[in-house]
Each structure stands twice: as structure tokens, then as C-alpha cells.
Amino acid sequence: MPAMELAGNFFLVGLMGAGKTTVGRTLARHAGKTFYDSDHEIERRTGVKITTIFDIEGEVRFREREKQVIAELCQLHDIVLATGGGAILAAENRAALKAHGTVIYLRAQIDDILARTKHDKSRPLLQTADPRSKLEQLYLQRDPLYMEIADIVVDTSSQNVNTLVQRLEQRLSKQAI
């Protein structure tokens, strides 16, 4: 089954820096689907960056906005959605993602995430004296939640995007049979 015939929604979950947006854009293009990034959608709707929302309203209010956006996006058809790394913290988000599409966990190693995010100031949770420790803490907290809802788990370490998407499309094709 060619990638263009892959039916349904694909939801990407994983820690920040795992490659959800990059892989999601490529997968959507290959599969002829519309791409969304929940963080970008929140920024579009509010007119401000995620870091500003965190600074002014805090993480709790950001997570409320995130729940609303994910609930709405899950109602769409034939989309690829890259979720924020913490989206799975809310049981409502996990249930919505699981119920409305194929959940793909992009699992990355801490070293890879650090390399990908070291100069990125748009990640509020990493604006700390010890980003490695923070990522390790987030991984321990979130990995079981990602695994709980994942239909497919893909290791994003040491793979270029096109190879990763090609392998992912093969797995999605097999799953659809």
C-alpha cells in the first residue's frame, strides 16, 4: 500500500526535541494529509509564543489551552498532528489521541535531545541550570504515558528524517492490512 493511501489520523507524541514537528511535516507531505503542530496552533490562536504563555499564565493555564486545541484537532480527519511533549500528561489528551487515530511515539535518547535543543530558547522547561537532569526527569515521568497510548514506537536516534519517515510508512502500511 503506497503511503498516499494510508488512512486515518496520525498523532506524534514524544519528548521535546524528539523530532515530532520535523517528522510530522514530512509524513503529512508523503501521505497527502494536513499537518498540525499543537504548540504552533496555540501560538497562532493566542498571538504569542509558548514561552510567553508560560511566563504570564504559567504551565497550568498552558495545559488547559493545549487540552482544548488537541480536543478540537482530534475531530479533524486525515491529519498528522505533532503534539507538545507534555500533552500526554492530561488523561483527556491521551484518551482523545488514542480514540481518534494512530499514536506514534517518537522515542529519542537524552543525548540526542540535548544536541537538538541546546541553542533553542523556546523550550521553557529546559531554561534551567541543568537541562540534562530536567530531561531525565521528564523522560522518567512521561515515557510510561507515551508507551501507554502508543500504537507504534520509533527510535529517532541517529536516523535522518527521510529514512525514519520511510520506515514509519512501511510500519503504518503493515498495520493497515
Image (cartoon, helix red, strand yellow):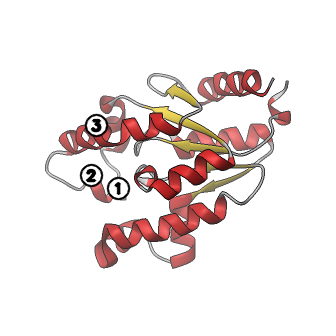
In the image shown, does 124 or 90 lie closer to the viewer?
90
* Front of the two marks 1 and 3: 3
Q: Amino acid at mark 1?
A: Arg
Q: Nearer the viewer, residue 151 or 62?
A: 151
* SS state under label 2: helix
Residue at x 45% of width, y 50% of height: 88
Taking 109 as reference, is 145 above or below it?
A: below
Q: CA distance from mark 1 to mark 2?
A: 6 Å
Quarter of the image that includes the N terminus: top right
Front residue (pair 157, 59)? 59
Which amino acid, mark 3?
A: Leu
In the image, is residue 70 above or below residue 17? below
- For label 3, the residue is 140
Q: Which mark is residue 168?
A: none
- The picture places residue 75, in percent across and down from the top left corner, at 71, 60
Say whether residue 155 is left or right of residue 76.
Answer: left
Q: Position of residue 21 (x, y in %)?
A: 55, 47
- Which residue ends up furthest to the left in the rendered image? 129
Q: Which residue is mark 1?
A: 123
Determine which of the numbered discs, if any, sits on residue 126 in the image. 2
Q: Is residue 65 left or right of residue 55?
A: right
Question: Percent x, y for residue 165?
Answer: 64, 29
Q: In whole angstroms, how far apart are the C-alphas of marks 3 and 2?
A: 15 Å
Which circle, 3 or 2, is nearer the viewer? 3
Residue that appears at 68% across and 49% down: 100
